[in-house]
Image (cartoon, rainbow, N blue to C red):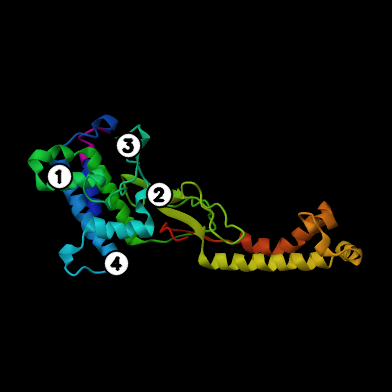
């Protein structure tokens, strides 16, 4: 797949970094505007239009009767929002010469409301339309804040366009994962690996929707672990049902008359119960210890 977008993004990022060497990027300067900033905003937004339409096609969005009838926001970004919940995804402004202290300025959700039209849409998109149609009157909207949000939106769409999978081998902490994803301005939020539930569902933290990437088992590992757990549960049952204490109990009692919460524990006692659990789990634990991980895009499907 030919990627025409990343090189353009990197050029826009380079020019923004050059600008930050001339203007002090901090909380007090976000409303600074200029012809140069407005130009960068427009160029970012044009790229967003192009890449969002490309992603729309990739996801099988219905074609418009006329290409001019396909809108990058209410059609394309809306589809991406429905699929991937991009409005919730967050970026961290991490450039060395950015000096934002407010969390609201340092951590952004650049695609929030981007799929909406008019005054209910994102501020950077409103600014783009205003500057594009009347640059003299609306130049003030070509400011640092709107530029950074538009650039962040373009960066995020580029990440989803590239759709890279990172092999982590047995590193469940993803210590080598590149959270800046090739950017000198932004870093992404990475959802840490927590657990898989008893039904093998992925364990989601409170920040799951904000994370662009997540750490998970590889597909092979997940299947191997499912099989290992099923085998362990069967071994547990066989060891429990054949245990002398259980057989003795069943000689004089019916299992359906038991009213406690853990039959095996109550009949065997704590020590014997633990021994059975440990014996049944030896081989399964060996499989679990060999688990391999990967970092994948959070497409809101796991």
What's the mark number on residue 105?
3
Residue 97, visible in the rendered structure:
yes
Mark 3 or 1, which is nearer the eye? 1
How far, Cα to Cα, is label 1 from label 2? 33 Å
- Specify which label sits upstream in the sequence, 4 or 3: 4
Q: Which residues are magenta?
A: 19-25
| Nearer to us in this view, 136 or 280 | 136
Residues at circles 3 and 2 in contact by the CB criterion of under 8 Å: no
Q: Which residue carries the number 1 mark? A: 130
Among the two numbered marks 3 and 1 on one chain, the one whose residue lies closer to the N terminus: 3
Answer with mark 4 or mark 1, whichever residue precedes in sequence: 4
**Cα gap from disc 4 to disc 2, whole angstroms:** 30 Å
Q: Which residue is mark 2?
A: 179
The quarter of the rendered structure image containing the N terminus is bottom left
Lower position in the chain sequence, tag 1 or tag 2: 1
On the question of residue 5 being in view, the answer is no
* Comparing labels 1 and 2, the label whose residue is closer to the camera: 1
* Residue located 16% across and 68% down the image: 66
Of the image marks 4 and 2, the number of the one nearer the N terminus: 4
22 part of magenta stretch: yes
Which element is circle 2 on?
Answer: loop
Where does the image place residue 269, in percent across and percent down from the top left?
84, 53
Pointer 4: what residue? 61
Binning the other alpha carbons within 10 Å of mark 2 as few (below 14), some (14 to 19) or many (20 upward) gives: some
Packing grade of label 4 (10 A; few <14, some 14-19, many >=20) is some
Q: Position of residue 251 (x, y in %)?
A: 91, 66
């Amino acid at each position: 797949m030919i990627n025409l977008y990343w090189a353009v993004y990197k050029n826009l990022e380079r020019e923004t970094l050059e600008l930050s060497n001339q203007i002090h990027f901090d909380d007090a300067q976000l409303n600074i505007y200029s012809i140069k900033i407005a130009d960068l905003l427009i160029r970012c937004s044009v790229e967003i239009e192009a890449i969002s339409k490309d992603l729309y096609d990739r996801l099988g969005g219905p074609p418009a009767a006329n290409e001019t009838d396909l809108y990058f926001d209410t059609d394309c970004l809306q589809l991406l929002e429905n699929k991937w919940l991009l409005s919730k995804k967050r970026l961290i402004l991490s450039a060395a010469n950015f000096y934002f202290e407010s969390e609201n300025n340092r951590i952004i959700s650049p695609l929030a409301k981007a799929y909406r039209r008019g005054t209910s849409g994102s501020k950077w998109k409103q600014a783009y339309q205003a500057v594009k149609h009347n640059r003299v009157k609306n130049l003030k909207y070509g400011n640092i804040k709107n530029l950074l949000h538009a650039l962040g939106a373009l960066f995020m769409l580029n990440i989803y366009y590239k759709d890279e999978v990172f092999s982590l081998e047995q590193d469940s902490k993803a210590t080598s994962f590149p959270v800046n994803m090739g950017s000198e301005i932004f870093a992404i939020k990475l959802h840490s690996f927590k657990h898989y539930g008893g039904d093998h569902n992925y364990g989601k933290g409170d920040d799951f929707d904000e994370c662009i990437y997540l750490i998970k088992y590889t597909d092979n590992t997940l299947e191997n672990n499912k099989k290992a757990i099923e085998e362990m549960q069967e071994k547990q049952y066989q060891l429990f049902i054949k245990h002398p204490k259980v057989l003795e109990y069943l000689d004089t009692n019916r299992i359906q008359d038991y009213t406690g919460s853990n039959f095996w524990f109550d009949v065997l006692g704590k020590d014997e119960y633990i021994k059975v659990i440990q014996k049944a789990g030896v081989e399964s634990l060996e499989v679990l210890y060999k688990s391999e991980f990967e970092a994948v895009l959070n497409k809101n499907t796991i």
